[in-house]
Image (cartoon, rainbow, N blue to C red):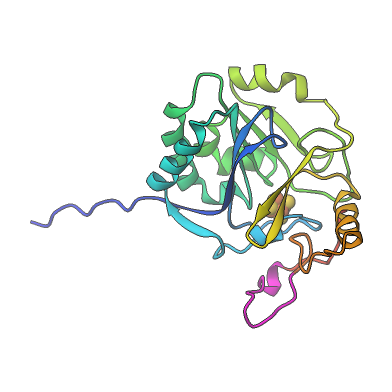
Amino acid sequence: MRAPRARAEPVLRVSRIVHPVTVLGPGRRLVIWVQGCGLACAGCMSRDTWDPAGGTGLPVTALAAACRGLLVRGADGVTVSGGEPLDQAPALAALLAALRPALRHAVDILVYTGYETDEALRIGAAVLRHADAVITGRYDAARPTRLVWRGSANQSLLPLTGLGRRRYAEHLDREADPAPLEIFPDGDGLQVVGVPQRGDLRRLETGLAREGAPPRTVSWRPARPTPSSPTIPPSRRTEERDHA
Ligand code: SF4
Protein backbone atom coordinates (compact mmCIF):
# COMPACT_ATOMS: atom_id res chain seq x y z
CA MET A 1 0.00 0.00 0.00
CA ARG A 2 1.36 3.40 -0.96
CA ALA A 3 1.90 6.02 1.74
CA PRO A 4 -0.36 9.05 1.27
CA ARG A 5 1.44 11.80 -0.63
CA ALA A 6 2.24 14.84 1.55
CA ARG A 7 0.37 17.92 0.44
CA ALA A 8 2.74 20.53 -1.01
CA GLU A 9 3.08 23.66 1.10
CA PRO A 10 1.63 26.75 -0.55
CA VAL A 11 4.18 29.18 -1.95
CA LEU A 12 3.47 32.91 -2.24
CA ARG A 13 5.36 34.92 -4.83
CA VAL A 14 6.40 38.17 -3.15
CA SER A 15 7.92 41.36 -4.53
CA ARG A 16 8.95 42.91 -1.18
CA ILE A 17 8.02 43.36 2.44
CA VAL A 18 8.52 46.61 4.40
CA HIS A 19 7.85 47.51 8.01
CA PRO A 20 6.89 49.99 9.31
CA VAL A 21 4.96 51.84 6.61
CA THR A 22 2.58 54.67 7.56
CA VAL A 23 1.01 55.56 4.20
CA LEU A 24 -0.97 52.45 3.20
CA GLY A 25 -3.64 52.24 5.87
CA PRO A 26 -3.96 53.59 9.41
CA GLY A 27 -0.98 53.61 11.75
CA ARG A 28 2.29 51.70 11.48
CA ARG A 29 1.93 48.73 9.18
CA LEU A 30 3.68 45.70 7.83
CA VAL A 31 3.22 45.81 4.05
CA ILE A 32 3.55 42.77 1.80
CA TRP A 33 3.67 43.41 -1.97
CA VAL A 34 2.86 40.23 -3.85
CA GLN A 35 4.35 39.60 -7.28
CA GLY A 36 2.33 39.15 -10.45
CA CYS A 37 -0.56 41.12 -11.93
CA GLY A 38 -2.33 40.51 -15.22
CA LEU A 39 -4.74 43.44 -15.03
CA ALA A 40 -2.31 45.87 -16.71
CA CYS A 41 -3.98 49.15 -15.70
CA ALA A 42 -2.67 52.01 -17.85
CA GLY A 43 -0.59 54.32 -15.65
CA CYS A 44 0.14 51.66 -12.97
CA MET A 45 3.04 52.84 -10.78
CA SER A 46 4.11 49.25 -10.00
CA ARG A 47 4.84 47.67 -13.36
CA ASP A 48 7.77 45.91 -11.72
CA THR A 49 5.23 43.71 -9.91
CA TRP A 50 3.44 42.56 -13.07
CA ASP A 51 5.68 39.67 -14.12
CA PRO A 52 4.33 36.53 -12.41
CA ALA A 53 7.78 34.94 -12.66
CA GLY A 54 9.48 37.88 -10.91
CA GLY A 55 9.99 38.43 -7.20
CA THR A 56 10.68 35.50 -4.89
CA GLY A 57 8.56 32.44 -4.21
CA LEU A 58 8.43 31.81 -0.46
CA PRO A 59 6.80 28.91 1.39
CA VAL A 60 3.98 30.26 3.54
CA THR A 61 5.41 28.85 6.78
CA ALA A 62 8.73 30.65 6.30
CA LEU A 63 7.00 33.82 5.15
CA ALA A 64 4.67 33.84 8.15
CA ALA A 65 7.65 33.38 10.48
CA ALA A 66 9.45 36.32 8.84
CA CYS A 67 6.34 38.49 9.15
CA ARG A 68 5.87 37.55 12.81
CA GLY A 69 9.50 38.53 13.41
CA LEU A 70 8.73 42.01 12.05
CA LEU A 71 5.37 42.34 13.82
CA VAL A 72 6.93 41.92 17.27
CA ARG A 73 8.42 45.38 16.76
CA GLY A 74 4.86 46.69 16.97
CA ALA A 75 2.24 47.33 14.29
CA ASP A 76 -1.29 48.68 13.98
CA GLY A 77 -2.02 46.66 10.87
CA VAL A 78 -0.95 44.52 7.95
CA THR A 79 -1.50 45.68 4.35
CA VAL A 80 -1.32 43.37 1.34
CA SER A 81 -0.70 45.12 -1.96
CA GLY A 82 0.90 44.20 -5.24
CA GLY A 83 0.84 43.02 -7.88
CA GLU A 84 -2.57 41.42 -7.64
CA PRO A 85 -3.05 39.71 -4.27
CA LEU A 86 -6.14 37.76 -5.33
CA ASP A 87 -4.29 36.09 -8.22
CA GLN A 88 -2.55 34.04 -5.52
CA ALA A 89 -5.64 33.53 -3.36
CA PRO A 90 -4.90 30.05 -1.92
CA ALA A 91 -1.36 30.87 -0.80
CA LEU A 92 -2.31 34.34 0.47
CA ALA A 93 -5.27 32.95 2.40
CA ALA A 94 -2.92 30.42 4.01
CA LEU A 95 -0.51 33.21 4.97
CA LEU A 96 -3.20 35.42 6.51
CA ALA A 97 -4.63 32.44 8.40
CA ALA A 98 -1.15 31.74 9.78
CA LEU A 99 -0.62 35.38 10.74
CA ARG A 100 -3.98 36.09 12.35
CA PRO A 101 -3.28 34.33 15.68
CA ALA A 102 -0.08 36.38 16.03
CA LEU A 103 -1.89 39.69 15.58
CA ARG A 104 -2.90 41.60 18.67
CA HIS A 105 -6.59 42.29 19.07
CA ALA A 106 -6.60 45.67 17.33
CA VAL A 107 -4.23 44.86 14.45
CA ASP A 108 -6.23 44.97 11.23
CA ILE A 109 -5.62 43.41 7.82
CA LEU A 110 -6.20 45.56 4.71
CA VAL A 111 -6.06 43.97 1.24
CA TYR A 112 -5.72 45.89 -2.03
CA THR A 113 -7.08 44.37 -5.21
CA GLY A 114 -7.51 45.63 -8.76
CA TYR A 115 -10.58 43.44 -9.17
CA GLU A 116 -13.97 45.12 -8.90
CA THR A 117 -15.92 44.36 -5.74
CA ASP A 118 -18.11 41.62 -7.24
CA GLU A 119 -15.08 39.98 -8.87
CA ALA A 120 -13.08 40.22 -5.64
CA LEU A 121 -15.81 38.67 -3.52
CA ARG A 122 -15.99 35.78 -5.99
CA ILE A 123 -12.30 35.23 -6.78
CA GLY A 124 -10.92 36.20 -3.39
CA ALA A 125 -13.45 34.92 -0.86
CA ALA A 126 -10.82 32.70 0.79
CA VAL A 127 -8.56 35.74 1.29
CA LEU A 128 -11.18 38.29 2.26
CA ARG A 129 -12.57 36.13 5.07
CA HIS A 130 -9.28 36.96 6.86
CA ALA A 131 -9.34 40.68 5.99
CA ASP A 132 -10.84 43.57 7.97
CA ALA A 133 -11.05 45.87 4.95
CA VAL A 134 -10.47 45.76 1.22
CA ILE A 135 -9.80 48.41 -1.43
CA THR A 136 -11.21 47.27 -4.76
CA GLY A 137 -11.12 48.40 -8.37
CA ARG A 138 -8.69 48.88 -11.22
CA TYR A 139 -6.57 52.00 -11.28
CA ASP A 140 -8.17 54.49 -13.69
CA ALA A 141 -5.79 57.34 -14.54
CA ALA A 142 -8.68 59.37 -15.99
CA ARG A 143 -10.36 59.56 -12.57
CA PRO A 144 -7.89 61.20 -10.15
CA THR A 145 -8.88 61.42 -6.50
CA ARG A 146 -7.73 62.83 -3.20
CA LEU A 147 -9.43 60.06 -1.24
CA VAL A 148 -6.82 58.69 1.12
CA TRP A 149 -5.15 55.37 0.10
CA ARG A 150 -7.03 55.20 -3.21
CA GLY A 151 -5.41 55.83 -6.58
CA SER A 152 -8.54 56.72 -8.53
CA ALA A 153 -12.07 57.83 -7.70
CA ASN A 154 -13.66 54.55 -8.80
CA GLN A 155 -11.82 52.54 -6.14
CA SER A 156 -13.86 51.55 -3.07
CA LEU A 157 -12.72 51.15 0.53
CA LEU A 158 -14.94 48.52 2.13
CA PRO A 159 -14.75 47.53 5.81
CA LEU A 160 -15.49 43.82 6.22
CA THR A 161 -15.47 43.22 9.99
CA GLY A 162 -16.31 45.04 13.20
CA LEU A 163 -12.67 46.00 13.62
CA GLY A 164 -12.61 47.14 10.00
CA ARG A 165 -15.69 49.34 10.52
CA ARG A 166 -14.25 50.88 13.69
CA ARG A 167 -10.84 51.42 12.14
CA TYR A 168 -11.84 52.68 8.66
CA ALA A 169 -15.17 54.51 9.16
CA GLU A 170 -13.50 57.90 9.57
CA HIS A 171 -11.39 57.34 6.44
CA LEU A 172 -14.08 56.34 3.94
CA ASP A 173 -14.51 59.90 2.64
CA ARG A 174 -11.33 61.45 4.03
CA GLU A 175 -9.21 63.33 1.53
CA ALA A 176 -5.47 63.89 1.79
CA ASP A 177 -3.73 66.68 -0.07
CA PRO A 178 -0.90 66.16 -0.69
CA ALA A 179 -0.98 62.34 -0.62
CA PRO A 180 1.33 60.94 2.04
CA LEU A 181 4.32 59.16 0.47
CA GLU A 182 7.37 57.49 1.98
CA ILE A 183 10.67 56.70 0.31
CA PHE A 184 12.81 53.73 1.32
CA PRO A 185 16.22 52.60 0.07
CA ASP A 186 15.80 49.53 -2.17
CA GLY A 187 19.05 47.91 -3.29
CA ASP A 188 20.81 50.55 -5.38
CA GLY A 189 17.55 52.41 -5.93
CA LEU A 190 14.64 53.91 -4.05
CA GLN A 191 11.18 52.61 -3.35
CA VAL A 192 8.31 55.11 -3.35
CA VAL A 193 5.56 53.86 -1.04
CA GLY A 194 2.04 55.25 -0.94
CA VAL A 195 -0.64 56.23 -3.41
CA PRO A 196 0.56 59.31 -5.33
CA GLN A 197 -1.75 61.92 -6.76
CA ARG A 198 -1.59 63.30 -10.29
CA GLY A 199 1.78 64.97 -10.83
CA ASP A 200 3.53 63.58 -7.71
CA LEU A 201 5.76 61.09 -9.54
CA ARG A 202 6.75 63.59 -12.22
CA ARG A 203 7.64 66.11 -9.50
CA LEU A 204 9.72 63.45 -7.76
CA GLU A 205 11.63 62.68 -10.97
CA THR A 206 12.17 66.38 -11.62
CA GLY A 207 13.42 66.90 -8.06
CA LEU A 208 15.88 64.01 -8.33
CA ALA A 209 17.14 65.33 -11.68
CA ARG A 210 17.61 68.77 -10.13
CA GLU A 211 19.75 67.16 -7.41
CA GLY A 212 21.89 65.52 -10.12
CA ALA A 213 20.44 62.02 -9.58
CA PRO A 214 17.85 61.42 -12.33
CA PRO A 215 16.48 57.86 -12.09
CA ARG A 216 17.63 55.54 -14.90
CA THR A 217 14.47 53.47 -14.71
CA VAL A 218 11.20 53.90 -12.85
CA SER A 219 8.52 51.33 -12.10
CA TRP A 220 5.77 53.46 -13.65
CA ARG A 221 7.16 53.26 -17.22
CA PRO A 222 8.08 50.17 -19.22
CA ALA A 223 11.73 49.22 -18.74
CA ARG A 224 13.85 49.39 -21.89
CA PRO A 225 14.69 45.80 -22.90
CA THR A 226 18.33 44.86 -22.34
CA PRO A 227 19.96 41.42 -22.48
CA SER A 228 20.03 41.30 -18.68
CA SER A 229 16.64 42.77 -17.89
CA PRO A 230 13.60 40.59 -18.56
CA THR A 231 10.77 42.35 -20.34
CA ILE A 232 7.08 42.14 -19.69
CA PRO A 233 5.49 40.05 -22.45
CA PRO A 234 4.10 42.26 -25.25
CA SER A 235 0.59 40.97 -24.61
CA ARG A 236 0.67 42.73 -21.25
CA ARG A 237 2.14 45.97 -22.49
CA THR A 238 -0.09 48.99 -22.30
CA GLU A 239 0.21 52.33 -23.91
CA GLU A 240 2.79 54.32 -22.03
CA ARG A 241 0.73 56.75 -20.03
CA ASP A 242 2.32 58.18 -16.94
CA HIS A 243 -0.49 59.14 -14.60
CA ALA A 244 1.81 61.46 -12.67
S1 SF4 B 1 -2.69 49.29 -10.52
FE1 SF4 B 1 -2.72 47.36 -9.33
S2 SF4 B 1 -4.24 46.10 -10.43
FE2 SF4 B 1 -3.65 47.71 -11.84
S3 SF4 B 1 -1.92 46.87 -13.05
FE3 SF4 B 1 -1.03 47.96 -11.29
S4 SF4 B 1 -0.71 46.37 -9.74
FE4 SF4 B 1 -2.19 45.55 -11.24
Nearer to the camera, 216 or 238: 216
Instruction: Residue at 87%, 64% (x, y): give it.
Output: 212
Outermost residue to the front:
211
Q: Is residue 94 left or right of residue 110?
A: left
Q: Is residue 203 left or right of residue 1?
A: right
| Residue 126 pos. (x, y %) | 49, 38
Is residue 229 found inside the magenta-colored segment of the image? yes
| Residue 78 pos. (x, y %) | 58, 34
Is residue 30 found inside the magenta-colored segment of the image? no
Q: Is residue 54 left or right of residue 46?
A: left
Outermost residue to the bottom:
227
Instruction: Residue at 13%, 54% (x, y): give it.
Output: 3
Instruction: Residue at 51%, 19% (x, y): give it.
Output: 105
Outermost residue to the left:
1
| Above or below, comparing residue 52 to residue 16 in the picture | below
Q: Which residues are magenta?
A: 223-236
| Residue 23 pos. (x, y %) | 72, 36
Q: Main secondary structure of the magenta part?
A: loop
| Residue 109 pos. (x, y %) | 58, 31
Nearer to the camera, 159 or 110: 110
